[in-house]
Amino acid sequence: MKGCWVAVFGCVGLLAPQSGAAHQLQPAYLELREVTPGNFAVAWRTPRRAERPALWPRLPEGSHQRGPIGVQQQQDISVYRWLIQVPAGTLRGSSIEFPGRTAELMDIVVRIVWRQGPAWTGVVRGSQEDLRIPRQPTPGTTLTRYVALGVEHIWFGFDHLLFVLGLLWIARGWKRLVATVTAFTLAHSLTLSLAVTSAIRLPPVPVEAVIALSILLLAGEVSGNAQGATSRYVWAVGFGFGLLHGFGFAGALGEVGLPPGAMLWALAGFNLGVELGQLVFVLVLMLAGLLWSRRAAPSGGWIERLPVYGMGTVAAFWFFQRLAAFP
C-alpha cells in the first residue's frame, strides 16, 4: 500500500500548485448587491472586448435602470456597473437571461447579495441561456445546497486534502486509521459549529498559516519514516490540528453566509458535505492502496521520498505565503 501513497502524493502535489493556474480561464461574472430595499448595484464583468460586449445580461422583467452605465478596464477584463430598481419581492423566483451565451462558450457566475439573509450563487453553463433565482429556500433545499457546498469545499481545499493524506500515510493499521480520521472529523466539526455561531472566533490569516504548517510537520514525519511521537499519537495530532482546520472550514462558510431562519439546516448540511467529501476521498485512497499493493512491487529510495518532499515544499510555500499576508 505504501507504493500507492507515493503515487497519490505525486498526483496531489502536481494538482496543488496548479490551483492558481486554473483562474486563467475565468468565467463572466454578474453580481447584484442590494444597497437599499429594492435597489441593487449591478456589476457585470466579462473578457475585455469592444466598448460594449456582445454578451449582455437581460435582467428580470420589472427592473428599471437608474443612472448611466459606468465601465472600468482592468487588464484583460471589462467591468460594467450600474444601478437598478426592482419591485419588492419580484427578484426571487424570476430569471436572468443571457441571449447568445451558447455562441460565446463561456460559463457565467451569478451572485446575488441581499441586505438580509445569505447571498445566493448560481452558474450558467452548457446550453443554458438563463438562470432562475430560487424563491425563499425551504429546509430541504437549504440542506441540499449546503451539502453540495461542503463537498465542493473539501474537494477543492488542497491544503485539507494534503493534511488528510499525510494522516493516512502515518496512521498505519486499520484501527489507528479509523481512530485518526474519527478524531480529525470530531475536532473540525466542533470548531466549525462554534465558529459559525460566533461562540469562538480566530483571525483567518494565522489559522490558514498554521494549517499549512500542520501539513509541513506531517511531511517531515513521513520523510523520517514515521518513527516519531507524531506517529505514535497520530489520533491526537489529527484531533489537535483538526480544531484549526474547523476554523478554516468556518471561514469558507462565512463567505457564503447562513440563512437566518435555517442556520441549523445550513450548518448541518455544510458539515455533512465536508464529511461526505472527506469520506469519499479516504475510501478512494484506500481502494487504490489495496489494488496497488496486489499489483505493484515495493519501491524505495529517493523515488519513494520525492513526492513527500514535494508535499513539504508546497506546504512551506503556503506557510510563507500566508505569513506574508499578516498585517
Image (tube, helix red, strand yellow):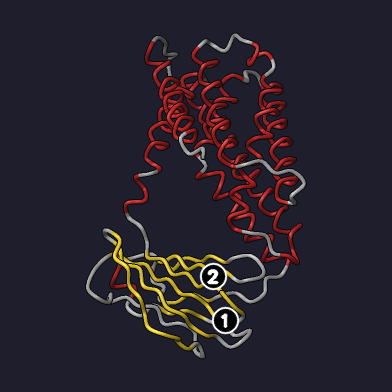
Q: Is residue 72 left or right of residue 3?
A: left
Tag 2 residue: 112
Residue at image point 41% right, 31% down: 13
Q: Identify which residue, 173 or 48, lies in the foreground.
A: 48
Q: CA distance from mark 1 to mark 2?
A: 10 Å
Residue at image point 64% right, 47% down: 250
Q: Residue 241: percent from the left, percent from the top? A: 65, 29
Q: Residue 138: percent from the left, percent from the top? A: 71, 70
Q: Is residue 295 left or right of residue 246?
A: left
Q: Residue 204: percent from the left, percent from the top? A: 59, 42
Residue at image point 32% right, 78% down: 100
CB under 8 Å between callouts 1 and 2? yes
Q: Residue 165: percent from the left, percent from the top? A: 54, 29
Whether residue 61 is visible to the viewer of this picture, yes or no, is: yes
* Up-down relation of residue 92 to residue 303 (above or below): below
Which residue extends farthest bottom?
A: 62
Tag 1 residue: 91
* Up-down relation of residue 166 to residue 149 (above or below): above
Q: Is residue 63 left or right of residue 54?
A: right
* Up-down relation of residue 14 to residue 219 (above or below): below
Q: Amino acid at mark 2?
A: Ile
Residue 137: assigned label: none
